[in-house]
Amino acid sequence: MDLVSKIIGTASKQPEKKPTVAVESIADGALDTLSSVIRVMGDESFPLEKDLDPAVFPAMCTEFARHVENGAAVPSFDIPQSVDGAREWSRVRRFFADRRHAEKSFVTERLQDYRSIVDDLVSGLREIGQRDESTENSVRESLKAIEEAVERGRLREIKKALSKTVRKVNETFTEQKRDYEKQLKELNDRMSNMRQDLVAAREEMKRDSLTDAYNRGAFDAAIAQSLNMHFILQQPVTLVMVDLDNFKTVNDTFGHATGDEVLRAVGDCLARSFIRKSDFVARYGGDEFAVILSDTSARHADRLIERFLEYASDIRVPSVPDEALVSCSAGYTEIASSDTVEALIKRADQALYEAKAAGRDRAAFIAA
């Protein structure tokens, strides 16, 4: 060993650098994030006019998400399975950009339609005001002519002025009525078309595309309505929050496609467990669901929740070994007259936390 080696040591003894692990970790996180963004884009997409089948676009997003994750094929765009792990990044970017441009155009056009309707309404009201003022002036002139004829005391002039006034007033109001009806018909036609668009969009956005449960927006509206009905009728209402135990492990171990299968299975299980027409099942977000049980006290809800947990324990997904399947935990509470939406959800969430802290795969109740 030469003198230099003795002083600074050999190259083999230098500390090993491990940038590859950090880079791979960052890359994996970026791919997972990007695939999640694409899936959310599909789940929460606007119903565009070109989407003849509302299920097609979310399915495309799922294909692209899998392509991002592992280079899977994208049949909708004739992208084959990658043999070396390469991705068609330019196609992914174009797919995402095209959809965002289309949705931006959709929103912009709808906003312009609404603004146009408001402008037409204001313009119509202004015209009505101007026409009413014109009508009033015309009637006043006719009445003034009658007064002058009366002052002169000439019966023939009075009769002529009255006849002219009556005819002019009738003509004015007939024309005014015809204009009003025309404007109202045009406005009603436009509002009817917009109303049909809104109803179609509301029906489309009401359901979660993956589980077919109601979505978060529908839940927010339903829970507010439940509070109002409780305030008026004092009927009991129970809110149940359901969360999948260890769901992240399934996603990380078996992939998002398998995770989606599990979420669909839990959604089906909830639909089979809460079967009354008034029972409201929604996907609250991620792997959490919410159930609103109208006209049901917590005491009676207890049995229904236990039945769901029993059904959930029998869920089987072919791509997941039995020992790795997730279980469900539930937290529930009954509406109180003093509740706000925020307070009610917070209490149900706290009950859910207690169920998980107690060992999962169970239900917990917190009273108001």
Image (spheres, helix red, strand yellow):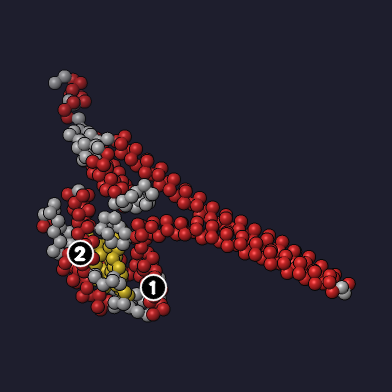
Residue 16: x and y, percent?
Answer: 20, 33
| Numbered disc total | 2
**Residue plotted at (24% across, 78% down):** 300
Q: Is residue 295 visible?
A: yes
- Checking the image for residue 227, the label placed there is 1
For the residue pair 239 and 120, the one nearer the viewer reads as 120
Tell me if residue 158 comes above or below residue 317 in the rendering.
below
What distance separates the C-alpha of mark 1 from that of mark 2? 26 Å
Q: Quadrant of residue 227?
A: bottom left
Q: Identify which residue, 353 or 235, lies in the foreground.
A: 235
Residue 148: x and y, percent? 85, 70
Left-right relation of 198 to 64: right
Residue under circle 2? 269
Q: Nearer the viewer, residue 153 or 356?
A: 153
What's the mark number on residue 142?
none
Residue beneath the point at 39% across and 80% down: 233
Quarter of the picture holding the N terminus: top left
Indicate the secondary structure of the residue bearing disc 2.
helix
Q: Quadrant of the C terminus?
A: bottom left
Specify few, some or many for label 1: CA neighbours under 10 Å numbering under 14, 14-19, or 20 or more.
many
Residue 125 visible in the picture: no
Instruction: Name the spot of residue 42 as percent of width and height, x first.
Output: 31, 49
Residue at horizontal 29 percent and vertical 55 percent from the top: 209
Q: Quadrant of residue 214?
A: bottom left
**Amino acid at circle 1:** Leu
Give the crowd class for mark 2: few <14, some 14-19, many >=20 residues within 10 Å.
Answer: some
Question: Is 82 rendered above or below residue 255?
Answer: above
**Secondary-structure class at tag 1:** helix
Residue 142 position within the rendered picture, expressed as x and y whole percent measured from the top left: 78, 67
- Judged by depth in the image, the label closer to the viewer, 1 or 2, is 2
Q: Amino acid at mark 2?
A: Cys
